[in-house]
Image (cartoon, rainbow, N blue to C red):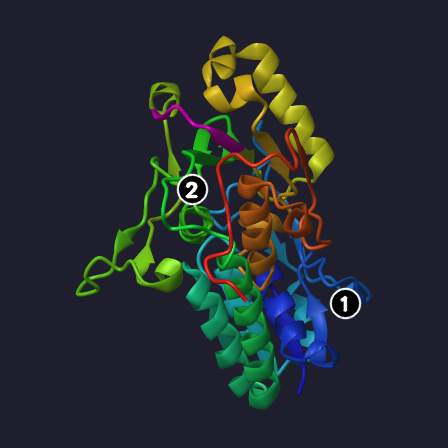
């Protein structure tokens, strides 16, 4: 089987379920794990990035596909995302001329549970169902292990995760989920219980979901009184995020009015993975968030999340394991 992936999270999922040897082509953003970097690149970025560094992921016009190159690879399966992740008109043109008409497997997760289900689904498609099941079991174990350091007995800090600085955009989908499950609150885009789920207050709050990322005003941001702020700009590395955050801090007097800024509770997280990329890496992000909010250095020091910021190991509020061993 020959597989082309045009979505970074799909590439990561493919490798997770043991299908890296099947990958014959990738997007220019597929950069993890590093073992796939020798595969042919089939897309390119054409749109001008905004001041925040985050390219427009809604129009789908910012990425092009090397149609001839994709056809020449003769894939059996193409992994792609929803609108905004690739030029779907060009993709249709490319696969329309490919021999055998490859199967399109779409990835559009909005929750952490969707990420797990996507891995199982891909395992079935590529004939590695057992490997996928084992991988997802291991992912879930890591996720729930981090959950055990979160106490449900006291209200956590008010958290804001910024995906863009100009304009201000707060994270959505899985991001509020991760924050709330890590013990914080996400007042600018809170989760809600699924229909017929009751209070949805069970272990890990698996029956609660949030909406898409949303733009907010400065007034809305200040009104929240955020006690912890994370800046994770999609597609940007730490150095670029540091530059953009510094530019905002120096050019906007209101930035220092945020309680988290005054107390040094601002973290910058690499936007090339981190919150910005739905996929198996969200488990690493969750463990990091639990560790950062609770001052658990053993959780924040993993290789899965690149970040920097103040008060690395000082707990913002009391955390203790929910269950004793």
x, y percent for residue 182:
47, 49
- Residue in the image at 66% along x and 87% along y: 1
Residue 200 on image: x %, y % = 26, 60
Q: Quadrant of residue 235?
A: top right
Residue that label 2 marks? 184
Quick check: can you spot residue 108?
no
Residue 226 painted magenta: yes
Mark 2: few, some, or many residues within 10 Å (few <14, many ≥20)?
Answer: many
Q: Secondary structure at mark 1?
A: helix
Q: Residues within 10 Å of mark 1 (few under 14, many from 20)?
A: some
The magenta region covers: 224-229
Query: Residue 195 in magenta?
Result: no
Relative image position of residue 193 (x, y in whole percent)? 25, 56
- 313 relative to 282, above or below: above
Q: Nearer the viewer, mark 1 or mark 2?
A: 2
- Quadrant that contains the C terminus: bottom right
In the displayed structure, would residue 254 be above or below residue 11? above
Residue in the foreground of this view, choosing between 35 and 302: 302
Going by the picture, which residue comes out furthest to the top? 253
């Amino acid at each position: 089987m020959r597989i082309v992936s045009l979505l970074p999270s799909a590439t990561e999922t493919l490798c997770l379920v043991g299908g890296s040897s099947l990958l014959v082509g990738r997007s220019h953003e597929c950069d993890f794990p590093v073992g796939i970097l020798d595969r042919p690149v089939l897309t390119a970025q054409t749109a001008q990035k905004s001041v925040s560094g985050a390219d427009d992921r809604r129009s789908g016009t910012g990425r092009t596909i090397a149609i001839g190159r994709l056809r020449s690879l003769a894939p059996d399966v193409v992994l792609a995302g929803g609108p905004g992740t690739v030029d779907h008109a060009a993709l249709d043109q490319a696969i329309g001329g490919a021999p055998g008409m490859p199967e399109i497997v779409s990835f559009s997760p909005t929750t952490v549970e969707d990420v797990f289900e996507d891995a199982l689904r891909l395992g079935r498609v590529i004939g590695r169902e057992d490997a996928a099941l084992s991988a997802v079991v291991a992912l879930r174990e890591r996720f729930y292990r981090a959950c055990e350091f979160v106490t449900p007995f006291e209200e956590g800090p008010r958290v804001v995760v910024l995906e863009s600085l100009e304009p201000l955009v707060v994270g959505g989908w899985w991001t509020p989920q991760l924050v709330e499950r890590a013990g914080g609150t996400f007042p600018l885009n809170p989760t809600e219980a699924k229909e017929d789920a009751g209070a949805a207050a069970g272990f890990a709050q698996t029956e609660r979901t949030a909406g898409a990322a949303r733009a907010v005003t400065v007034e809305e941001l200040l009104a929240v009184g955020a006690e912890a702020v994370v800046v994770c700009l999609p597609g940007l590395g730490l150095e670029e995020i540091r530059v953009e955050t510094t530019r905002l801090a120096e050019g906007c007097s209101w930035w220092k009015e945020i309680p988290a800024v005054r107390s040094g509770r601002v973290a910058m997280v690499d936007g090339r993975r981190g919150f910005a990329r739905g996929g198996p890496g969200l488990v690493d992000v969750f463990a990091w968030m639990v560790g950062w909010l609770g001052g658990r250095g053993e959780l924040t020091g993993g290789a899965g999340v690149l970040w920097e910021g103040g008060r690395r190991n000082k707990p913002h509020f009391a955390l203790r394991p929910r269950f004793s061993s």
